[in-house]
Image (cartoon, rainbow, N blue to C red):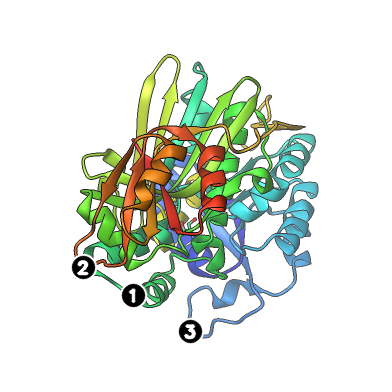
Amino acid sequence: MAKIAVMGYGTVGSGVVEILRENGDLVAERCGQKIEVKKVLDLRDFPGDPAQELIVHDIAEIVGDDEISVVCETMGGVDIATKFVTQCLEAGKSVVTSNKAMVAANGSALLKLAQKNNVRFLFEASVGGGIPIIRNLRTCLTADHIQKIFGILNGTTNYMLTKMYDEGADYDAVLKEAQKKGFAEADPSADVEGWDACRKIAILSSIVSGRFVDFQKIHTEGITKITPVDMAYAKAMGRMIRLVGESVVEDDQVHAMVAPMMFDKEHALAGVNMEFNAIFLTSDMLGDTMFYGQGAGKLPTASAVASDVIEAVSSPEAVKRSVWTDEEMPVAEFGSENRRFFARVSGDESLADTLGAQLGSLQVLRAPGIAGEFGIVTGELAEETMAACVKACPEIISVIRMAD
Ligand code: HSE
């Protein structure tokens, strides 16, 4: 019998306890032994909940309990979570976590500590919710150079953009819905401002490059500026808007970005709706692969955490090679990437000629019911060229990148 603890009995933590109870026999069969949740750490009490009798309020009760071999960290936040995880690893316990903020900020040090203590530090649930992407990168795609990662990595914003596009839903109302459904972070600005997706693309880039990629150096834009007018233009173009993360490993550096993009309706990512996520990988031997599934929510995310628990119980000792080292992988300065852009421009179309002189050939668009402005789609040009034009031209209302 393996005994484990769960730190944080919120949406994901309670899901982990539920899965290990509901699917206990199956888990025991796959692990070769039963897994018992012995303690649950939380500041709160949960009267009437089956986990109430397991609740402890002091981390020392877990760290000092020699019977506990694996600890799930599902508290969220960075500083306290890192402190508790550090204590658990130092006490010789494996740790599994869904906490991307902690992994993106302190993953290198925690991986090193796990290695030193000959235990596991696993974080499948930190990217793509329930989608098994990290394990596939760690154990399946190991003979390939992964050249590009491109995907929808945040369930909350994908849910919001789907509802805003399909139903004309109001931004604030649909964000509240996403929070109610347990998709959003405790502070949902991490979702809507793109930081959650940014941390996830940094984690994937670190795994792929084997070196630490600092999320704070990745150009990040969220969906806070996306309006119903953008949706109207997207519809007029037969496109939809999705928040994506992109990372290309090239010449010993990473070109990475998180931003909303316009997708043709035929594009595979345009069919990724609601809280679902999808991740495209391009690698030198396999070519293109796509991973798709529930990117947020209690049981999908908890399923990924529980799979890590099973791995840590079944193979408790550190593997030879750490997932990534603390050597930093440089993030390329943002600006040289080439792509097409959609922009909204105020005034009449006479400005199109001036813009065309700066940006090259333009396609001019109108969206039904939108007056006093027009849309343009540029040819392929560098990010820095577009940024300079936006700076010089106050008539440009907003810009969204085109995904070709
Ligand atoms: N807030 C995150 C999301 C949860 O919406 O994707 C899953 O990581």
Vertical side of 188 occupied by 20: above or below: above
Q: Is residue 102 left or right of residue 404?
A: right
Please state if 334 lies on the left or on the right of 369 as rendered.
right
Q: Crowdedness of circle 1 by 10 Å Cα count: few (<14), some, many (20+)? A: few
Q: Who's the residue at 61% across and 31% down the image?
A: 254
Disc number for residue 48: 3
> Is the residue under label 3 in contact with that under label 2 (CB below 8 Å)?
no
Question: Of the residues under marks 2 and 3, which one precedes in the sequence?
Answer: 3
The residue sitting at 67% across, 44% down in the picture is: 217
Q: Report how far apart the C-alphas of labels 3 and 1 lie in the structure.
A: 37 Å
- Is residue 372 in view? yes
Three-letter code for the amino acid on which mark 1 is drawn: Asp
Compare marks 3 and 1 and give the one earlier in the sequence: 3
254, above or below 26, in the image = above
Whether residue 132 is visible here, answered yes or no, is: no
Q: Label 1 to label 2, Cα distance in Å?
A: 18 Å
Q: Quadrant of the C terminus?
A: top left
Question: Residue 244 at what x, y percent from top left?
Answer: 44, 46
Identify the element where label 2 is drawn.
Answer: loop
Location of mark 2 (residue): 369
- Asked if the residue under mark 1 is in contact with the one under mark 3, i.e. CB atoms within 8 Å, the reply is no
- Give the Cα distance between marks 2 and 3: 54 Å
